[in-house]
Image (cartoon, rainbow, N blue to C red):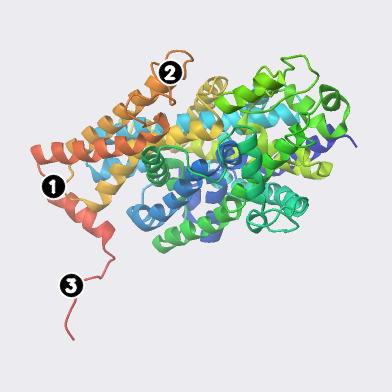
Amino acid sequence: MDQFTINLLFVGTSFALYIGIAIWARAGSTSEFYAAGRGVHPVTNGMATAADWMSAASFISMAGLIAFTGYDNSSFLMGWTGGYVLLALLLAPYLRKFGKFTVSEFIGDRFYSPTARIVAVICLIVASTTYVIGQMTGVGVAFGRFLEVSNTAGLLIGACVVFAYAVFGGMKGVTYTQVAQYCVLIMAYTIPAIFISLQLTGNPIPALGLFGDHVASGEPLLQKLDAIVRELGFNEYTAHHADTFNMVLFTLSLMIGTAGLPHVIMRFFTVPRVADARWSAGWALVFIALLYLTAPAVGAMARLNITDMMWPNGTDAQAVSVEQIENDARYDWMATWEKTGLLAWEDKNGDGHIQYYNDKNADMQAKAADMGWQGNELTNFNRDILVLANPEIANLPSWVIGLVAAGGLAAALSTAAGLLLAISSAVSHDLIKGSINPNISEKGELLSARIAMAVAIAVATYLGLNPPGFAAQTVALAFGLAAASIFPALMMGIFSKKINNTGAVAGMLAGLGVTLIYIFLHKGWMFIPDTNSFTDADPLLGTIKSTSFGAIGAAVNFAVAYLVAGMTKETPQEIKDLVESVRIPRGAGAAQDH
């Protein structure tokens, strides 16, 4: 059986499972569509949350970004996991106790303002749509490779699949579909990593193998990787080279963005009790850790394998020949990925070899001149292909490659479904029912939610054709937008009685506005190519990149909200009492001396 047929078998079987679950768990009421009837067990919800969370950015893109940058991109790991601690401690239990369906509904009621609710809807749609762009980018990469079609065709196919099971199942269908998707994606991520760790280090646990010895050379694996990348003119893999201030801001932006993402927060509305919300967050961290502890090893080992393939006889000998790439079965993956447009090479100097090195390094430029090289000849290696190509690079069995195909698609589709549900809920429940037509029937509300989701899929698919960066980078922009707009409003809504409706609205608009403008200045207006005035390599404000600005936007949000609230009418007493009831358990009183 050829590889294409095996891929179809794995992908087709998994999709049949997802769509079957969606039909079985089809939402029949608004409660089931928005919150799965509030009957999801904490362990089940934790697993679904992990799948919702571990998107194309985590599965497909993160290890690639770590592989080609090293230590400096460990901020993705720190920010994304740290955010769950904030979510579990500061937000999830209180929001569940409030008892609403959506984040926007909480903000509207807490700040006693339809305007606040509408502004929250706008913030949610902007952040979630940006996030979906990253997911659809990953969907296009995965479908393009494993169905052996173009990236564009893969994106369109993926959009149709998302539509098929997300639009009809609602939160109830999405929850149980995501449980299945988590099982698929975690097996697809860890099994190849175990094989590769055994090949390179003899240790079946990738996280431990990362700090073990390289079997072939006897050297510590990371030490060998450092030496090789230095020889090719790249930065040392395990050293810190990036700007520390920007790295801190970026990590903080990812953390508070995680805690402010509406599609993740919505998961905590699905459990029966307040305590279950906290347990769900704890279980989600456990399930997420299985992948996040493995990702650094996947990145490092893949980088070593790629370098060895491009320099099969060592960096002091000749680079891989064009003839070997074309005729050696171990290099078939390169020809397959070339069809997607995400991998390319060119024999620039016509010597019959493909030299892979950092042609921007001054020392390597001098060496290249002596050797007759004319630039890096691995001209395109999209970071988003690394995890999907990893089993092929390591020459693993065909069934492992098929499993990774199913896992990559499960990761992208599970998060896309959660995000689209958050968008549709905001439009139908918060905008239409909450502001435009409060008397809409339950059937009409469900219909409007499904139409909103279909429109969101179409918009995200269109924007996914020209994303503003790799999947993880695009997702980081969404986290910045959530950090600057939604997270401060939730924190102030739960922990501050001083913030009134005017302050909350002003803060959200200020935080979203400055962050969106800063992103557009660096990534192009509405993400349209070549409309940017700055780049992340040469940012507007010092060393602060567009992906890190969310933390600054959050500070602006807090500052404006407190300033405006202090200058306007005080929060009504009934709202202060509401905040008190959300934060303090029923029956709690003042401490007594016994």
* Alpha carbons under labels 3 and 1: distance apart: 24 Å
* Alpha carbons under labels 2 and 3: distance apart: 55 Å
Q: Determine the image quadrant of residue 164.
A: top right
Labels 3 and 1: the sequence-earlier one: 1
Q: Position of residue 141 (x, y in %)?
A: 65, 29
Q: Nearer the viewer, residue 171 or 520?
A: 520
Labels 2 and 3: the sequence-earlier one: 2
The residue tagged 3 is 590
Whether residue 473 can be seen here: yes
Q: Position of residue 118 (x, y in %)?
A: 31, 32
The residue tagged 2 is 524
Residue type, label 1 = Pro
* Alpha carbons under labels 1 and 2: distance apart: 42 Å
State which mark lies toward you, 3 or 1.
3
Labels 1 and 2: the sequence-earlier one: 2
Q: Position of residue 36 (x, y in %)?
A: 51, 49
Q: Secondary structure at mark 1?
A: loop
CB-based contact (under 8 Å), mark 2 and mark 3: no
**On the rendered structure, is 241 left or right of 67?**
left
Does 55 sit above or below residue 40? above
The residue tagged 1 is 572
**On the rendered structure, is 184 left or right of 84?**
right
Q: Secondary structure at mark 2?
A: loop
Residue type, label 2 = Gly
Q: Determine the image quadrant of residue 208.
A: bottom right
Residue found farthest to the front: 370
Q: Which mark is residue 86?
A: none
Q: Nearer the viewer, residue 263 or 207?
A: 207
